[in-house]
Image (cartoon, helix red, strand yellow):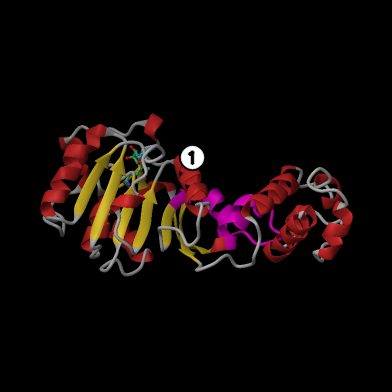
Amino acid sequence: MAAIDGLPPLRAVIAAHGLAAKKSLGQNFLLDLNLTARIARVAGDLSACDVLEVGPGPGGLTRGLLAEGARHVLAVEKDARCLPALAEIAAAYPGRLTVVAGDALALDVAAHLTPPVRVVANLPYNVGTELLVRWLTPPDWPPFWQSLTLMFQKEVAERIVARPGSPAYGRLALLAQWRAEAKIALTLPPEAFVPAPKVHSAVVHLTALPAPRYPADPAVLGRITAAAFNQRRKMLRSSLKGVAPGIEDLLRAAGIEPTARAETVSLEAFCALARAVKAQAG
Ligand code: SAM
């Protein structure tokens, strides 16, 4: 039976194009078009947006995005075996889908997108984390994207939205929450994918803030949080010793107890510390 968009069901697409999932490309496909439409809706109203989709694979999520009304989808796929299936989707939605063959980590496609841009992806988890960090650390803010709707391993999703005091709280939470609003929108069991991964997954939705939540120099903040969380069990006066001379006074100036551990310190306090360190360095 044809699906709502007149295209064959995804199982038939996969069989017709011989798209057996490749572990080396982190392929776990979503085959339920109701679910992919739900994920597309997490990204918000797409009718006035260009959507960057990374890793469309056989196109389940792509079809969800187009069926939900995305103005235009630019899809970047590394596996050339998927291109004929994606061409069929492009033909069913004339002028609304552009497919770029290549590695999303090596290509810079932002220039081919017309704002406003929303990013949606179900990617291999390692690629997803690397792209998330890049998208959160552009040379200028605000970035090219308005929102990011990304599938992660549930444990990584929890690290992105974690609050102080939680074992999941660390550099990823600080990076994400400094310049974006981050929430877990959906959690999915392994059986939602073919083949089923070993772990649960979650869709994280991040909305770019117009400016960072608290002022801080990104490089200084990055240096401090790296040192603080690389030795997260240590007191900050010791883990941050190498960051700046007189770190105990700087910590106190930022309202942080020098004996505190990184895990308990808020984003606001880390930003205050970054400003104090920068001011001292002149
Ligand atoms: N979006 C599809 C879905 O939800 O069914 C496929 C998801 S599968 C987890 C990840 C997809 O990303 C695969 O199609 C894989 O070939 C592609 N991929 C992996 N690494 C990539 C990269 N560096 N650049 C672009 N695509 C990549």
The image position of residue 238, as x and y in percent, is 86, 46
Ligand 1 is located in which of the four quadrants?
A: top left
Query: Circle 1 — which element?
Result: helix
Q: Taking the image as drawn, is residue 30 in sight?
A: yes
User: Up-down: is 159 above or below 199?
Assistant: below
Residue drawn at the location 81% of the way across and 43% of the way down: 242
Q: Would residue 46 appear left or right of 159 to someone viewing this image? A: left
Find the residue positioned furthest to the front.
Answer: 282
Q: Is residue 90 above or below residue 49?
A: above
Left or right of 146, for residue 10: left
Residue 163: which quarter of the image?
bottom right
For the C terminus, give its image quadrant.
Answer: bottom right
Q: Position of residue 197 (x, y in %)?
A: 43, 41
Q: Is 156 in the magenta?
A: yes
Name the one closer to the observer, 58 or 94: 94
Disc 1 under 8 Å from ligand 1? The reply is no
What residue range appears in magenta?
A: 151-178
Q: Position of residue 34 (x, y in %)?
A: 27, 59
Number of residues whose C-alpha sits closer than 10 Å to that of mark 1, classed few (under 14), some (14–19) or many (20 or more): few
State the residue at coordinates (30%, 40%): 77
Q: Quadrant of residue 179?
A: bottom right
Magenta region includes residue 19: no
* Residue position for label 1: 126
Residue 88 point in image, percent of width and height? 13, 46
The answer to which of 156 and 55 lies nearer the viewer is 55
**Amino acid carrying mark 1 in the image:** Asn
Vertical relation: 27 (above or below) 113: above
Q: Is the residue 90 above or below the residue 143 in the image?
A: above
Q: Nearer the viewer, residue 3 or 92?
A: 92
Q: Is residue 58 visible?
A: no
